[in-house]
Image (cartoon, rainbow, N blue to C red):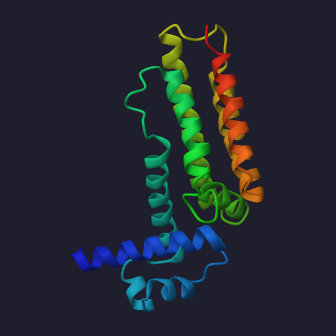
Amino acid sequence: MSAKGELTRRNIIEKSLQLFSVKGYFNTSISDILQSAGLTKGGLYCHFKSKEEVWRAVYDEAVEIWKAVVFKRMRSATDPLERIERTIENVLLDYLGREVFDGGCFFVNMLVELSGQSDTMGRHILKGFVGFSKLFQSWLTEAETAGLLKPDLDYREISNFIVITLNGAATLYMSTRDRAVLQQTNDQLHFFIRQLRS
C-alpha cells in the first residue's frame, strides 16, 4: 500500500473510531464516515469492503490504544499481584478517568449495543473480555507459584469478579461522570487483592 493509501486508511479508522465511540455502530452511517473522513464512496471502498470491516479495523485500533494505557508501568512490576493492582488502577483512573474515548469505554459501549444485534461482532468483543480475565488468571497462577497467595483460591472466579467490577464501574462512571466511582472502585479492588496474599 502506498504512503498516501496508508494515510487514507488511518484517517478512515481514526474518524470512524470517533464516530462509533460517540454515536454507536448502528447510528453511524457510511455517509457519516465519508463526510468525517472527507472521502467519496470509492475512496472508502478502496480500503474497506463494508462498514463491518471498518468496525473490525477500528476495534483493533481501540485495543492498541487501550493496551498502551492499561499496561503502562508494567515492566518494573515483578510481583504479579502488584501487576494486577497497577492494571486495575490504569483501567479506572487513566483509561476511564481520562476518557480516552469520547463516548466512554468503547468496548463496553460496543458490547451493549451489538449483543443481540450482531452475534459475530458481539462475540468478538466478548472474547476480549475473556482474554483480559485469563490474563489475570495467569498472573494469579504466577503469584501462587511464588508463594504469594492464600491456599484454595479460585483464580477464574477472582479474575471474572475483577473484570465484571471494572465493567460495572465503567458503566456507572459513563452515566454519572462522578470520579468518586472510579476512585472508590480502585480502592475496593486494591483492598480485595491484598486480602488474597498469604
Q: Residue at x 58, y 43 (%)?
A: 91
| Residue 8, horizontal then vertical, whole percent | 34, 79
86 vs 64, nearest the viewer: 86
Is residue 76 at all visible to an observer of this figure? Answer: yes
Position of residue 2 relative to residue 38, above or below, is above
Position of residue 168 relative to residue 75, above or below, is below
50 vs 69, nearest the viewer: 69
| Residue 73, horizontal then vertical, whole percent | 42, 36
Residue positioned most to the left: 2
Position of residue 152 relative to residue 6, above or below, is above
The N terminus - image quarter:
bottom left
Q: Is residue 142 left or right of residue 137?
A: left
Q: Is residue 171 left or right of residue 79?
A: right
Q: Residue at x 37, y 78 (%)?
A: 47
Q: Quadrant of the rendered structure where residue 90 is?
A: top right
Position of residue 78 relative to residue 106, above or below, is above
The image shows a total of numbered marks equal to 0
